[in-house]
Image (cartoon, rainbow, N blue to C red):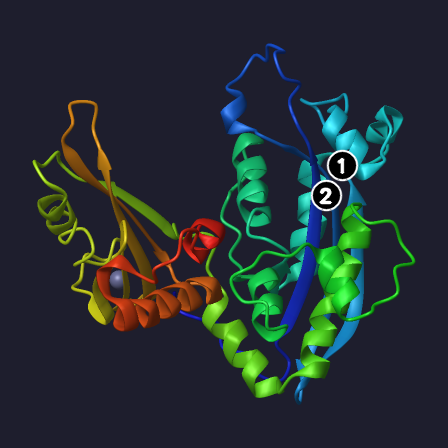
C-alpha cells in the first residue's frame, strides 16, 4: 500500500470505538450482516509529530444514541459496564461522525487492532452516509509487538499498558479510556525506540481503509496437490488492484501444507500471500489463497517461514506442534 509520508507537523488521531450488537435470535427488519455492530461511543486523542517526538494536542469524545440496537447486548454490557439508560444519552450517529471527522482533519488514524475502520465504514454505509474515510489507518498492535520484541503475537491494549508500566487510573473498555491508553502506548513506543525506526515501521504499515486490502482466491479441483498448488500461481502473478505483474520479493516456497510468498506491485506496495491446498468432498484437491497488503506481522511470518524452509526444506522443522498452528490467522 502506498504509505503516507510522515514529516514534522503530521497529525495522528488515536481512536477507539464501542459498539452494541444485535440480540441473538431477535428478528430485525433488515439484514443484520449489514450492521454487525452499531457504534455507541467514539473516543480520540490527537497528536502531532515534531522532531522525533509525538506531542499531545487535543481530545474528542462522544456518545451516540443507537437507533437499531437500543438494548445492550449482554456481552457489551459486561465488557463496557454500560447500562441501558446510558444509551439514551448522546447524539445521533450522523452528528457524532461529523464531529469526529472534523476533529481528524488530515490526520493518520491510529487504532488497536484492525477492526475499527471496517466497523466505522459499515455504520456509515448502513446509515446512508459516504463510507469513504479519506484517511490512512495504522494498527498500533503489531507495531507494539514489533518494538516490544513480541513479534507474531497479539496483545491487548491492557498488556501493552502493563508492559510500559503506564498508570491504570481509568477503567478499560470505554472508548475514551481505551483511546487514552492506546495514546499512552503510542507515546511510550516513541520514547523507548529510535524515532526513525518507529516512523519507518509506521509508514510501511499504514493502510488506506478505502481500498480493499484482503483478497482471496479458490482454484479449480485437481487430481493431486502439486497441480493444485501450481494452479494458484496465476492468482499471485498479478496485483489484485491494478492487474499489473507483481515482482516476487520472496518467491513462492512451500513449507508443510502452506505456500508463502512476498510480492510487490510498483504502484500499490507489498503483498503477502499464502496458499493452502484443501480436499474437496469428491476427494480432489483445490487451492485456497489469500493475498493482502503486508503488515508487520506478515513480514515477520513470511521471513520466519522462509528461514525455516531454507534450513529444513519442505517438511519444516521436525517437531510435533509448530509455531504455525499458534500464530497463523
Ligand atoms: Zn497494483
Q: At 67% across and 38% down in the image, what residue appears?
A: 94
Q: Residue 248 at what x, y percent from top left? A: 21, 69
Towards the viewer: 172 or 319? 319
Position of 270 compared to 80: left or right? left
Q: Which residue is mark 2?
A: 96
Report the residue at 78% width, 45% height from top.
173
**Are circles 2 and 1 on residues that touch, CB within 8 Å?**
yes
How far separated are the C-alphas under marks 2 and 1? 7 Å
Q: Which mark is residue 64?
A: 1
Residue 260 appears in the rendering: yes
Answer left or right for 129 relative to 184.
left
Give the answer, above or below, for where 254 lies relative to 267.
above
Mark 1: which secondary structure? loop
Residue at 26 percent of width and 58 percent of height: 315
Q: Position of residue 295 (x, y in %)?
A: 45, 63
- The image quadrant of residue 298 is bottom left
Q: Position of residue 134 (x, y in %)?
A: 51, 57
Q: Nearer the viewer, residue 289 or 47?
A: 289
Q: Residue at x 17, y 39 (%)?
A: 219
The front one of 238 and 102 is 238
Circle 2 packing at 10 Å, graded few (<14), some (14-19), many (20+), is: many
Amino acid at each position: 500500500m502506498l504509505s503516507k509520508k510522515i514529516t514534522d507537523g503530521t497529525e495522528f488521531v488515536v481512536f477507539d470505538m464501542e459498539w452494541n450488537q444485535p440480540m441473538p435470535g431477535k428478528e430485525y427488519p433488515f439484514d443484520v450482516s449489514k450492521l454487525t455492530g452499531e457504534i455507541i461511543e467514539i473516543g480520540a486523542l490527537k497528536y502531532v509529530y515534531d522532531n522525533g517526538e509525538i506531542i499531545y494536542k487535543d481530545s474528542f469524545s462522544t456518545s451516540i444514541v443507537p437507533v437499531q440496537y437500543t438494548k445492550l447486548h449482554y456481552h457489551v454490557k459486561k465488557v463496557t459496564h454500560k447500562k441501558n439508560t446510558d444509551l439514551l444519552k448522546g447524539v445521533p450517529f450522523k452528528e457524532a461522525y461529523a464531529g469526529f471527522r472534523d476533529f481528524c482533519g488530515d490526520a493518520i488514524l491510529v487504532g488497536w487492532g484492525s477492526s475499527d475502520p471496517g466497523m466505522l465504514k459499515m455504520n456509515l454505509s448502513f446509515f446512508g452516509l459516504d463510507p469513504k474515510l479519506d484517511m490512512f489507518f495504522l494498527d498500533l498492535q503489531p507495531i507494539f509487538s514489533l518494538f516490544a520484541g513480541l513479534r507474531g503475537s497479539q496483545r491487548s491494549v491492557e498488556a501493552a499498558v502493563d508492559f510500559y508500566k503506564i498508570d491504570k487510573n481509568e477503567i478499560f473498555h470505554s472508548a475514551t479510556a481505551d483511546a487514552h491508553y492506546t495514546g499512552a502506548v503510542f507515546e511510550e513506543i516513541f520514547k523507548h525506540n529510535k524515532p526513525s525506526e518507529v516512523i519507518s515501521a509506521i509508514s510501511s504499515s499504514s493502510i488506506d481503509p478505502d481500498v480493499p486490502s484482503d483478497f482471496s482466491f479458490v482454484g479449480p479441483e485437481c487430481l493431486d496437490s502439486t497441480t493444485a498448488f501450481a494452479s494458484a500461481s496465476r492468482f499471485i502473478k498479478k496485483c489484485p488492484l491494478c492487474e499489473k505483474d507483481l515482482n516476487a520479493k520472496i518467491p513462492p516456497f512451500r513449507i508443510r501444507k502452506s505456500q508463502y510468498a512476498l510480492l510487490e506491485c510498483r504502484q500499490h506496495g507489498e503483498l503477502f500471500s499464502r496458499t493452502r491446498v484443501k480436499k474437496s468432498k469428491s476427494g480432489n484437491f483445490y487451492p485456497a489463497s489469500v493475498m493482502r497488503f503486508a503488515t508487520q506481522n506478515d513480514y515477520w511470518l513470511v521471513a520466519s517461514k522462509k528461514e525455516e524452509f531454507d534450513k529444513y526444506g519442505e517438511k519444516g522443522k521436525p517437531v510435533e506442534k509448530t509455531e504455525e498452528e499458534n500464530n497463523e490467522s
